[in-house]
Amino acid sequence: MNPMKLKTFFALTLALGGVALAQDAQPELNTGDTAWMLASAALVLLMTPGLALFYGGLTRAQSVLNTMMMSVVSIGLVGVLWMLAGYSIAFGGGGNAFVGSLANVGLNGLADQLTGTIPTYVFAAFQTMFAIIALALISGAVVERMRFGAFVLFGALWTLLIYSPLAHWVWSADGWLFKAGALDFAGGTVIHIAAGISALVAAFVLGPRIGFPRNAHVPHNVPLVLLGAGLLWFGWMGFNAGSALAANQVAGLAFLTTLIAPAAAMLTWLGLESSRGGKPTAVGAATGLVVGLVAITPACAFVSPWAAVIVGVVGAAASYGAVQLKHRMGADDSLDVFACHGVAGIAGALLTGALAWTTAQGKPLGEQLLVQLVGVLASLVWAGVGSFILLKLVSVVMPLRVPASQEVGGIDINAHSEQGYADSETGLGAPVFLGGD
């Protein structure tokens, strides 16, 4: 490996997180890097309200507030839990290959510490935003039928017992997947695959919505979907480029590929819609760009700009195919969380291994692909089995589903004493039926 490639490799290794590496090098605080990371954390925070708009527009009008509240409550819930214990489970110093120590419970011991060239407090805040949106993503599979309280309890357990250990495996210098050389720059495995499979399991456990698939639950507000997708793309620039933990060449590459891959994925999705005898839709454009963002997330700083096009095209094709097979799976994943996040996350993780050579990263091609496959399978098993167990535990404490009358009529009034649209004369709350009795 020539000196330039070696320099790039070590820069990426540091960005993936070795707190230990940063301590060995005795870095100094860099105000430019710190400013960039503060901005990146704010960008990632914006993604969750963006997701709320995206999901809210895709649901029926009479459940829009409940759908959005599942994302909004994730901010408060995970914001507190990550401070109390989540960060320490994921990144606590002195941990083992599977879990961090509890040395940093309550973010104790982080004052005046550095992670790379930024304050560790800033790193902790940045990682908080990741944990928040990971939980919010799952809600898309269970909207319009899961009790709000059950989601909150499941979300608390999932964040501490599923997400935090997985983040340790992949991003902590002590984690076993990190040591094995798994490449996940910004969360394809930790966030999207984990949230995707957890969402699919939740859809199976809860069962389908009343009338599914005979009754159509069509998006009630497509402009909200487009607005949410735009905010997601905007915030995703901090999500991916911020994972460099510095304002440097690595961040620049991640920023550029995060522009290219979603653009390619959007065009691919629209082309697939049109090729099947349909028309290019606004919801399709929004879905395609989100799928492209998911697929490029693990690869964004490990592949070249031209390779990002491949990631976007393949990720969109894989997710589009998964959406078409949705009804055959027997699970009512309401907003296609597994198809769009789980499948695109898997595609992105494997393509990272296949295309990392374009920037001279990682192990030899076959070896890196094997490591990536191990990471994918570990995430699927850990999050899938763990989510099933947690949902069953929650069901012992309280029912998972709302009563049938609330599900049909809409959850907003009963769960929150509010409704999204005050003008009852618009008829926005009426369900749409396709044939049948």
Image (tube, rainbow, N blue to C red):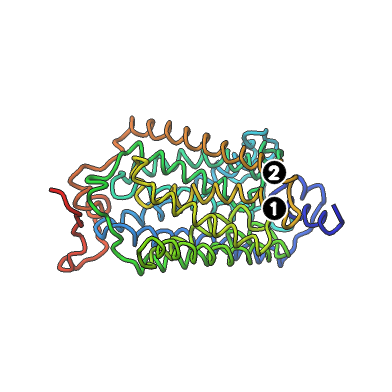
Classify mark 1: residues with Cα within 10 Å, few (<14), some (14-19) or many (20+).
Answer: many
Q: Position of residue 72 (x, y in %)?
A: 41, 56
Give the mark nearer the N terminus: 2 vs 1.
1
Q: Quadrant of residue 154?
A: top left
Residue for point 27% across, 53% down: 416
Q: Position of residue 410 (x, y in %)?
A: 22, 53
Q: Secondary structure at mark 2?
A: helix
| Residue at numbered disc 2 | 368
Residue for point 44% across, 54% down: 320
Q: Judge whether residue 112 can be spotted in this image.
A: no
> Is residue 3 or residue 308 the one in the foreground?
308
Please tell me the numbered disc located at residue 356. 1
> Is residue 334 or residue 329 the one in the foreground?
329
Badge 2 vs badge 1, beta-carbon distance below 8 Å? yes
81 left or right of 37 in image: left
Q: Position of residue 40 (x, y in %)?
A: 60, 63
Q: Judge whether residue 420 can be spotted in this image.
A: yes
Q: What type is the residue that disc 2 sits on?
A: Gln
Q: What type is the residue that disc 1 sits on?
A: Ala
